[in-house]
Amino acid sequence: MPILQQASIDDRKRLLELFPVSVLRHGWEHKGTKEELCYAAAADASDPDRERVAKFVDEYLGCCKQHVYVYSHNGEVTLPDSVLSGEKVLEGKSHALYVIRTTYNVVLRDPLEEQTLEFLWPLRVELTAEYMVVRFVVLEKNPSSYFERPVYVGGKSVDEKAVLAEISNGLLKPADLNKGLKKLWADGIIDSFKTKFKKTISTAAETMDEERGIKEHNPELYTILQESPLYLTVFQIQEEKSKIGTFSADPSNGIIGFTHYSEAKEDTDVVIDEILKNN
């Protein structure tokens, strides 16, 4: 895993900062604040410790905020050997973890100056009999925390769109997840209070007051939605199924989004698994 071997302590520290501190404590017993814990873990630079970082990121990636892209395949695909600007750092039976080095171009003010910030950006690719699932950790970096001056991001060296284009190589098509999500909706496992959907000759959007569930409080609209292709929709999920609370999906384009951290890695895993199992 050269990318982790060549990474600086700051690189590894920023990678670990993507995880909630309560989750980090599952991997390391270092005391102190989250920053102190991440620095201490990142400073352990031996080969076993770098492998430990890779295994931790792979095991607990589901606890992070994520953008998930699902592709259908014909059974002839394999896990990529590498990804754009990154490399494979761990491989399991049906998945692999990759780390991308991405550079933020930032502009500082007072006085005007250009700088760069580099981050290690993890993603996991999973294969099932029918689908390839690409899971990006959301990079929510606040550049002002690294500088003592006003700053804004001017651009990134690599983004999700470019990585996905390389992985799909024009051969994989986004999966239609309408069936799976509507089955969970019909079974009462999820409900939605905000949706965008296709009508006969137009696209419409609906948002319920006070985040009331559409199925429970607007059955007429729910009936229409069961027959309509769905676009960006926000769902609530039963707590006994997952404690993630809410998640978003663009079913017609094979996209799932998790905007909250999770204490348990299974919380986001079960959402993806249930959608695909019922699709």
Image: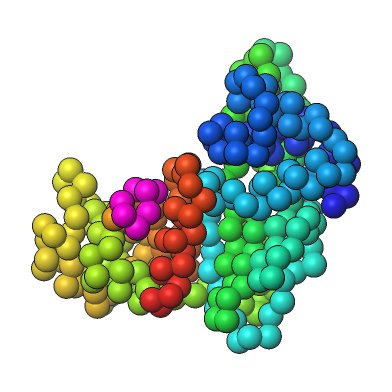
- Residue toward you, 245 or 210: 245
Residue 145 in view: no
Q: What residue do we see at 66% from left, 71% from top?
A: 94
**Residue 127 part of the magenta segment:** no
Answer with the quarter of the image where residue 86 lies: bottom right
Residue 148 in view: yes
Q: What residue do we see at 83% from left, 39% from top?
A: 7
Q: Position of residue 267 (x, y in %)?
A: 44, 53
Looking at the picture, the colour scheme in use is rainbow
The magenta span reads 239-245
Quarter of the rendering occupied by the C terminus? bottom left
Q: Classify residue 252 as left or right of residue 224.
A: right
* SS majority, magenta: loop
Q: With respect to residue 24, does 112 lie above or below? A: above
Q: Classify residue 188 as left or right of residue 110.
A: left
Q: Position of residue 262 (x, y in %)?
A: 46, 44
Q: With respect to residue 89, does 263 lie above or below? A: above
How many callouts does the rendering have? 0
Q: Position of residue 101 (x, y in %)?
A: 76, 46
